[in-house]
C-alpha cells in the first residue's frame, strides 16, 4: 500500500510542470531559430523548455512534429523542383509558418503566462553555427561530385 502510494506520487510529480521558475528559452528565440536555422532547431529549444518544466513526453511530441513538418516541406520542395520551380525563393515561408506554430501554438499552450526568466541564446547560437557553417561549406563540394 505504501509502495503503491509512493509510486502514484512519483507519477504525478513527473507529469506536473516544475514550479521552481527555471529559466526557459523565449518564444522569440524559438521563432528566430526556426526562421534562421530550421523549425527543428526551434523545436529543440522548445523541447528543452518542456523537459525542464516536466513535460518530457510533450517535448518529444513537439520534436516529432517538427521533423514530420520538415520532411513534408522537403517533399513539397522536391515536387516543386521536379516541375522546374526554384524552391529557394519559397524556403523562408515554411520556416516562418513552422516557427509560428511552435511559438504561437505550442509555446503558448505550455507556457501561457509571460512571467518567466529567459535563458541566453548564446550557447544554442554557437552550436547551431558550428553545425551550419561546415554544412554550408561542404554541401556544395559534395553536391558537385
Image (cartoon, grey):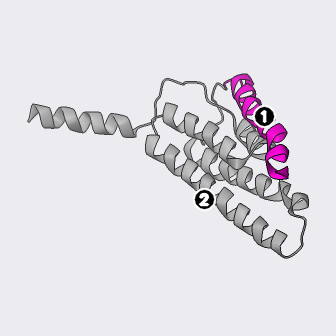
Discs 2, 1 touching: Cβ within 8 Å:
no
> Which residue, given by chain and number where applicable, does mark 1 sit on?
134
Q: Which residues are magenta?
A: 119-145
Residue 130 is drawn in which quadrant?
top right
Q: Earlier in the sequence, mark 2 or mark 1?
A: 2
Q: Which mark is residue 39?
A: none
Secondary structure type for disc 1: helix
* Residue shown at 55% from the left, 53% from the top: 64
Q: Report x, y in % for residue 24.
A: 61, 29
Residue 11 is drawn in which quadrant?
top left
Near mark 2 (Cα within 10 A), the count class, few <14, some 14-19 or many ≥20, is: few
- Judge left or right: residue 57 versus residue 66: left
Task: Report if residue 141 lies within the magenta region.
Answer: yes
Magenta segment, prevailing SS (helix, strand or loop): helix
Q: Which mark is residue 68?
A: 2
Which residue ends up furthest to the front in the rendered image? 145
Which residue ends up furthest to the left in the rendered image? 1
- Judge left or right: residue 55 versus residue 11: right
Label 2 vs label 1: CA separation?
24 Å
Task: Report if residue 123 lies within the magenta region.
Answer: yes
State the count of labels. 2
Say above or below: 135 vs 65: above
Say above or below: 75 vs 24: below
- Judge left or right: residue 140 versus residue 64: right
Secondary structure type for disc 2: helix
Amino acid at each position: 500500500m505504501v509502495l503503491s502510494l509512493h509510486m502514484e506520487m512519483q507519477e504525478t510529480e513527473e507529469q506536473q510542470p516544475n514550479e521552481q521558475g527555471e529559466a526557459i528559452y523565449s518564444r522569440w528565440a524559438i521563432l528566430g531559430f526556426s526562421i534562421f536555422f530550421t523549425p527543428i532547431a526551434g523545436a529543440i529549444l522548445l523541447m528543452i523548455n518542456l523537459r525542464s518544466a516536466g513535460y518530457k513526453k510533450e517535448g518529444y511530441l513537439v520534436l516529432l512534429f517538427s521533423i514530420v513538418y520538415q520532411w513534408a516541406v522537403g517533399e513539397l520542395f522536391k515536387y516543386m523542383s521536379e516541375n522546374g520551380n526554384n524552391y529557394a525563393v519559397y524556403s523562408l515561408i515554411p520556416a516562418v509558418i513552422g516557427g509560428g506554430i511552435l511559438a504561437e501554438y505550442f509555446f503558448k499552450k505550455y507556457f501561457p503566462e509571460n512571467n518567466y526568466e529567459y535563458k541566453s541564446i548564446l550557447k544554442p547560437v554557437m552550436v547551431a553555427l558550428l553545425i551550419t557553417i561546415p554544412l554550408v561549406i561542404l554541401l556544395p563540394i559534395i553536391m558537385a561530385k
